[in-house]
């Protein structure tokens, strides 16, 4: 049976208030007058916003991102930090987000258990995901559109980075004759995390690819050639997921729609099983009214395919998209600056503790996991195993 404190939101909220009160905070309940936080807590000169999530499942990355975005807003800036407290735990992508934000981030996350509040620090996380590396089945992704310059290589490289941040070794297979991936990430990238432990991304030339070559990689991401017939058929057959990048550009939506429908037709002739996701890349916020207009056109364009193919998904850009970012635009500038010896890197540098591409790609990885049941990649993440004392939370070291 569910313990009393977890039975419903009200009990859980009271439970959390009790902990905070005991730890010396003055607690004010906003009584749901506030969509962005549930409690305001004060101690000495510190004022903090607390978001309480009563959930039966692990926290997903978008739920955390929403709170992080609020803390970055003008209203959120009034608070010294934000506390995000939940019932069960944090899913892998959410943990990766927390870890990517580092220790100085304004957001602290915790789980309220029966008799203690447990902070997240991500140390044990690394050990636990490594258990899954030994499983033999690989998960294949294709990044594909019959069109150049829409962000295939960018998406392939950074999605690999998002998985690497979660502790998976990833193999990137370059199927594009332009071989941009190989030029950009060389023979591989090491993705460090704040704890200094990291994961590797290995890059393979499509012509050399065979499964044994990437024995340690659970995830294989193929940066496809825009000409479908130039991609090895044996690889397309293996795809579990295909990501089709596009842009929400007003004059281009219909044109891209045509290209994408052809793309889907081509893939389906070879692979009927893969989940296909259309992803908006290079997204610029056009304002609420225009966004609605663009979105309507976007969804209408694919309506027919969606109705006939239940594994075809058009991702709502308001839920997941890759925003236009200078970091991504200049990703790769190093191969022009230093063609002899380009260093391998991704556009994941933090600016003021945040990084759009990093947040967006972790969000994408999380979305795929939720929508397509990528849970096979990992067992249940029992965040409750992670133990940091509650004292650390109030000292701000979590
Ligand atoms: N979200 C983005 N924001 C800014 N620039 C981007 C973004 N996505 C891609 N680009 C830039 O657009 C260009 C084309 O992207 P690329 O990944 O090479 O496309 P493709 O592999 O489909 O040909 C690159 O210069 C890349 O840096
Ligand atoms: Mg490319």
Image: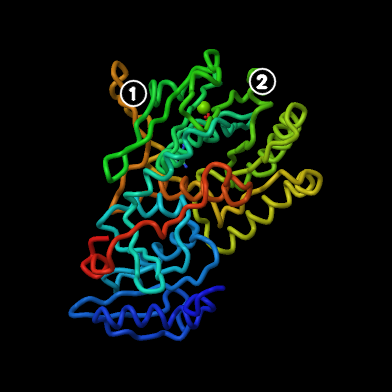
Question: Which residue does the image show at 29% across and 16% down from the upper left?
Answer: 340
Q: Is residue 355 above or below residue 23?
A: above
Which residue does the numbered mark 1 point to in the structure image? 336
Residue marked by disc 2: 234
Q: What is the C-alpha distance between the residues marked 1 and 2? A: 34 Å
**How many dots with numbers?**
2
Report if the CB atoms under discs 1 and 2 are less than 8 Å apart: no
Q: Is residue 284 left or right of residue 296?
A: left
For image coordinates 37% across by 81% down, the residue present is 17
Local SS, label 2: helix
In the image shown, does 295 or 24 lie closer to the viewer? 24
Q: Nearer the viewer, residue 221 or 387?
A: 387
Q: Quadrant of the C terminus?
A: bottom left
Q: In the picture provided, is 299 more to the left or to the right than 397?
A: right
Residue 194 in the image: state x and y as whole percent.
Answer: 28, 45
User: Can residue 74 be spotted in the picture?
Assistant: no
């Amino acid at each position: 049976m569910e313990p009393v404190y977890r039975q419903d939101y009200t009990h859980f909220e009271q439970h959390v208030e009790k902990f905070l009160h005991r730890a010396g905070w003055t607690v004010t309940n906003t009584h749901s007058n506030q969509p962005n936080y549930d409690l305001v807590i004060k101690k000495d000169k510190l004022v903090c916003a607390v978001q309480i999530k009563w959930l039966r499942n692990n926290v997903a990355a978008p739920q955390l991102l929403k709170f992080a975005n609020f803390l970055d807003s003008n209203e959120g800036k009034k608070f010294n930090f934000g506390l995000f407290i939940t019932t069960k735990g944090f899913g892998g992508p959410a943990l990766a987000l927390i870890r990517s934000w580092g220790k100085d981030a304004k957001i602290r996350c915790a789980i309220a258990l029966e008799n203690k509040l447990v902070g997240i620090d991500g140390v044990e996380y690394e050990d636990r995901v490594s258990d899954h590396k030994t499983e033999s089945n690989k998960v294949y992704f294709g990044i594909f559109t019959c069109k150049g310059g829409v962000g295939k290589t960018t998406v392939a490289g950074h999605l690999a980075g998002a998985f690497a941040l979660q502790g998976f070794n990833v193999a990137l297979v370059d199927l594009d004759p332009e071989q941009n991936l190989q030029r950009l990430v060389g023979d591989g990238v090491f993705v460090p995390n704040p704890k200094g432990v990291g994961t590797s991304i290995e890059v393979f030339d499509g012509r050399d690819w065979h499964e044994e070559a990437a024995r340690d990689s659970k995830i294989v991401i193929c940066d496809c050639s825009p000409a479908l017939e130039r991609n090895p058929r044996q690889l397309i057959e293996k795809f579990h997921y295909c990501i089709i990048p596009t842009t929400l550009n007003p004059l281009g939506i219909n044109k891209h729609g045509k290209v994408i429908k052809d793309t889907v037709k081509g893939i389906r002739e070879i692979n009927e099983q893969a989940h296909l996701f259309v992803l908006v890349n290079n997204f610029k916020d056009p304002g609420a009214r225009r966004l609605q207009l663009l979105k309507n056109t976007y969804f209408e364009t694919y309506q027919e395919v969606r109705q006939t193919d239940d594994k075809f998904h058009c991702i709502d850009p308001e839920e997941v998209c890759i925003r236009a970012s200078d970091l991504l635009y200049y990703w790769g500038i190093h191969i022009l600056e230093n063609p002899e010896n380009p260093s391998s890197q991704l556009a994941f540098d933090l600016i003021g503790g945040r990084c759009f591409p990093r947040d967006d790609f972790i969000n994408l990885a999380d979305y795929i996991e939720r929508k397509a049941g990528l849970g096979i990649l990992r067992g249940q993440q029992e965040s409750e195993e992670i133990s940091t004392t509650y004292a650390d939370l109030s000292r701000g070291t979590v």
